[in-house]
Amino acid sequence: MKNILFLLIIFSIQISAQSEQKSFYELKNDVITQLQDSDNEFNSVFSDEAKKKKSPGLAIIYSLLLPGMGELYAGDYDTGVYFTIAEGVFWGTYIGMNVYGNWQKDRYISFAQANAGISTDGKDDDYYATIGEYLNIEQYNNDKAFERNYGQMYNTEKYFWKWNSSADRKAYRSMWVSSEQTFNDLRFVVGAMLLNRVVSAINAVRLVSKYNKNLEQELSWNVYLDLQKMPDNSPVYNLNFSTSF
């Protein structure tokens, strides 16, 4: 665009010089006027470009909300798509593991009701962990009394349990361990999701920085118009210009 603009300016100057026979100063004023108009046009273009500069802060926010969106904001989703896919996989894993852990929990509670005679009212996680280690409440209370941990002893009516057999207790214990292990493993999934966001944010900032550098190119140009006289005293106009980015 700038090359076309300069050619048009030169062409218009030549036409003016040939057809109107303007003086040097008049011609110079015409050139300055045209260059000022052109400069305003370029400034307008570069102002619009400046408005399109990306914000690293927004890129970080987008990536933290949904990995890959920071890269999309930066205009380069080729790498961001992998973070988005990973996020979907992690969420699918989290939901699946959570559903499985709760399913196992429902199983071992129902199993304990049927094979140990427990009541679920007012029972906490410690209680469900304890009944998998002892055949009945008497065995548990005797063990705590022997250790002189009287405060940890259970009320025999409210917290009653008695397994039909050791096999039932072991089956219950297996279901309980499976459920608890699943819930514990959810922490690793959450950690992976956080790491995915951090890496995506770092990558998005890098892409935004790269994008903004492409917009920071500066255009500067100078035009020099001088008058030289030939040996026969005929005027010769020289127009020189330079550009830099």
Image: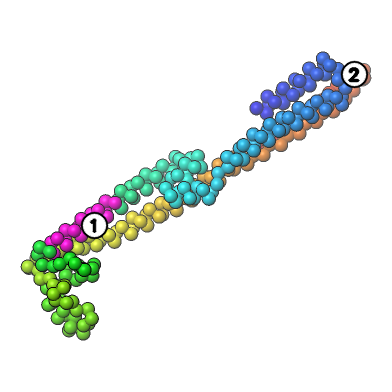
Could you tell me if residue 241 is visible in this image?
no
Q: Residue at position x 50%, y 47% from top?
A: 59
Q: What quarter of the picture does the N terminus occupy?
A: top right
Q: Position of residue 128 (x, y in %)?
A: 19, 67
Q: Is residue 11 above or below residue 78?
A: above
Q: What quarter of the picture does the C terminus occupy?
A: top right
Could you tell me if residue 179 is visible in this image?
yes
Q: Residue 31 carries which label?
A: none
- The residue that disc 2 covers is 234
Residue 245 horizontal side relative to residue 238, left or right:
left
In the rendered structure, are the residues bearing label 1 and label 2 in contact, judged by CB atoms less than 8 Å apart? Answer: no
* Image depth: mark 1 or mark 2 in front: 1
Query: Which quadrant holds residue 161?
Result: bottom left
- The residue that disc 1 covers is 101
Q: Where is residue 56 in the image (x, y as percent from the top left)?
A: 54, 48
Region in magenta: 95-112
Mostly what secondary structure, the magenta segment? helix
Q: At label 1, which amino acid type do we have?
A: Gly
Q: Is residue 72 above or below residue 13?
A: below
Q: Residue at position x 68%, y 26% from top?
A: 3
Residue 50 horizontal side relative to residue 61, left or right:
right
| Between discs 1 and 2, the one toward the N terminus | 1
Q: Distance between the residues labelled 1 and 2?
A: 98 Å
Query: Which quadrant holds residue 37?
Result: top right
**Label 1 crowd bin: few (<14), some (14–19), many (20+), radius 10 Å:** many
- Find numbered disc 2 in the image and state the secondary structure of the residue it sits on: loop
- Find numbered disc 1 in the image and state the secondary structure of the residue it sits on: helix
What residue occupies the far left of the structure in this picture?
A: 164
Q: Residue at position x 88%, y 22% from top?
A: 23
Q: Residue at position x 37%, y 57% from top?
A: 191
